[in-house]
Amino acid sequence: MTALTAPHPPSATTARVTPRTVVSSLWLFAVLCYLYCDVLGFFAPDDLRAILDGAVGGITLTDGFLLASAVLMTIPMAMVLVSRVAPHRIARWGTVVAGAVMTVVQAGSLLVGTGPRPHYVYFSVIEIATTGFLVGYALTRWRHDD
């Protein structure tokens, strides 16, 4: 007679985080960094005054600029979902392309305007490292779903 046993929960030595979980978690981390960096910008009185006046660091805050910013920030937000549910090939290459775009844009943003505030540089380093890592991870380690 065969005895039925309850499945054992994975132990710390056998539990493994899947590549999809790593990628989607890193995309979520990047999104939260983008968001909090921008929120902190509202606490700098000079920047807040500039926002209310409609121009920050030499950039005029037009409807077109705000729409372009919204579209740009939709990329990492969408990648949280895409990396979780899309077929592997789409999720992987989407991560490569979106990660490269966001890395270049964030690096370029450090060169725009009158110079970034320390909190912006801090978050930019984290964001660039995260999206750069995502590109490398997708290219070298995420070759198939596990």
Image: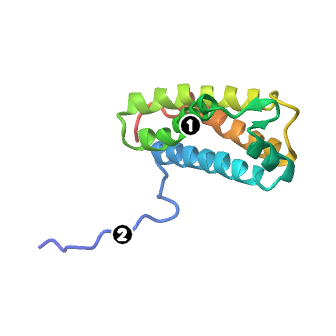
Identify residue type, mark 2: His
The picture places residue 108, in percent across and down from the top left corner, at 75, 26
Identify residue type, mark 1: Ala
Taking the view exactly as shown, the residue that stands out farthest to the left is: 1
Above or below, 134 relative to 13: above
Above or below, 24 relative to 4: above
On the image, numbered disc 1 is attached to which residue? 70
- Whether pointer 2 and pointer 1 mark residues with C-beta atoms closer than 8 Å, the reply is no
Q: Quadrant of the C terminus?
A: top left
On the image, numbered disc 2 is attached to which residue? 8
Q: Quadrant of the N terminus?
A: bottom left
**Sequence-first disc among 2 and 1:** 2
Which residue does the image show at 64% across and 49% down from the upper left?
Answer: 35
In this orientation, which residue lies closer to the viewer: 51 or 43? 51
Give SS at disc 2: loop
Asked if residue 62 lies left or right of residue 107, the reply is: left
